[in-house]
Image: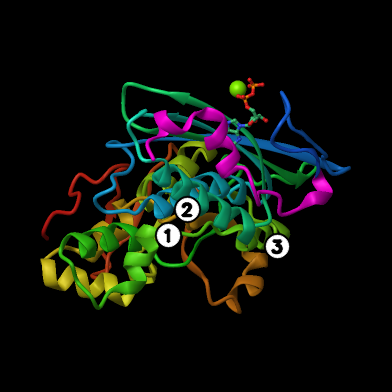
Amino acid sequence: MKVKDMGEFTLINAISDDVIFDPTTVIEGIGDDCAIYKSTEDYEQLISIDTMVEGIHFTFNTMSPYDIGVRLSTANISDIAAMGGIPRQIVISIAIPPTMDSAIIKSIYDGIKYQCKQYTINLIGGDTVSTSGPLVITLTIVGEVPKGKAVLRRRAQVGDCIGVTGYMGSSAAGLDAIYHTYQDTNVIIQSHRQPQPQVALGTYLRHIGATAMNDISDGLASELHEIADTSNITMLIEEELIPIHRETMLISNRLGNNPLDYALFGGEDFQLVFTIPSESLPAVHNQKDITIIGQIISKGDGTVLMKGKDQSIRVIEKKGYNHFSHD
Ligand code: ADP
Ligand code: MG
């Protein structure tokens, strides 16, 4: 049924069941003018917002409505993870073209609810409007972090090590795999369709004393630059140490792409990049999902250097000047 034939209230009813996964923090959920939620004593509140526009941030050609819901939630939850925080509540604003099938909206919500369930987040409200333009979905998330403990971008120190979680470039390589309809690269295709936020690792990294942290939404190079710029330091990473999934290597070989371009400039992995003092290194060595890739070498103006496999050192630009080019 088209959204315009269904009506706003029927639609809201259809999406507002099974949305509370941690009832201990909710006093009033969907249904009143505002939701009411509880905050935890001695914690600070984190809040972040993300918008996705059909045709700009997603298309129904490469992603199902369910995947779009998952991805939007991940982008949002990932921002909380990148502060070392715990995600708690979300509200959703949705602008729908009236001719859209309501089943699409329902599936997007199913993807969002699936993520809410996995990360114990409550969906406690939203707003529904119609639009003459494309579908627009905006998600606001509230999270918590113990007082004074949020991991900022601007606190990387000279001597700190630089690390990442998971693999770099899987989502971008996964998208190319979808375009080329490869069947044997399901791990990276899944990384594109249903990337997951690194909440547990974000909290762990806060616990062991990470000094700076970012989630990788725009690509490793860009996120490293953000840390380097705001912390006023120069960093050096090593090409050989950057973790790249073997399926990304496979796709790169087939398409004649440089896997490093996926790793440095491919966005939407939603992994974490962080800095930690060298004393904390033992706490990451036994973690299979964490890899150390470099070090903060001096105070500076935000330069990111990379030592290549041939030992030469070059400057890594913020955005890919050789974006997905052949080497
Ligand atoms: P109001 O007119 O008071 O803003 P609405 O009719 O917009 O109320 O919404 C009714 C209830 O449904 C509110 O609790 C609101 O938070 C919730 N709601 C509306 N749209 C959505 C949505 N797209 N997703 C989740 N909850 C929604
Ligand atoms: Mg409203």
Which of pointers 3 and 1 lies earlier in the amino acid sequence?
Answer: 1
According to the image, label 3 marks what residue? 208
Give the side of residue 322 with respect to residue 229, left or right: left
| x then y, percent, for residue 300 | 46, 40
**Is residue 92 among the parts visible in the rendering?**
no
Q: Which amino acid does label 1 sit on?
A: Gln
**Which region of the structure is painted magenta?**
1-25
Residue closest to the eye, 102 or 49: 102
Residue under the point 37% across and 66% down: 190
* Residue type indicated by callout 2: Val
Residue 85 position, x and y percent, is 68, 49
**Picture quadrant of residue 263:** bottom left
Residue for badge 2: 70
Disc 2, SS: helix
Q: Residue 42: which quarter of the image? A: top right
Question: Magenta stretch containing residue 6, yes or no?
Answer: yes
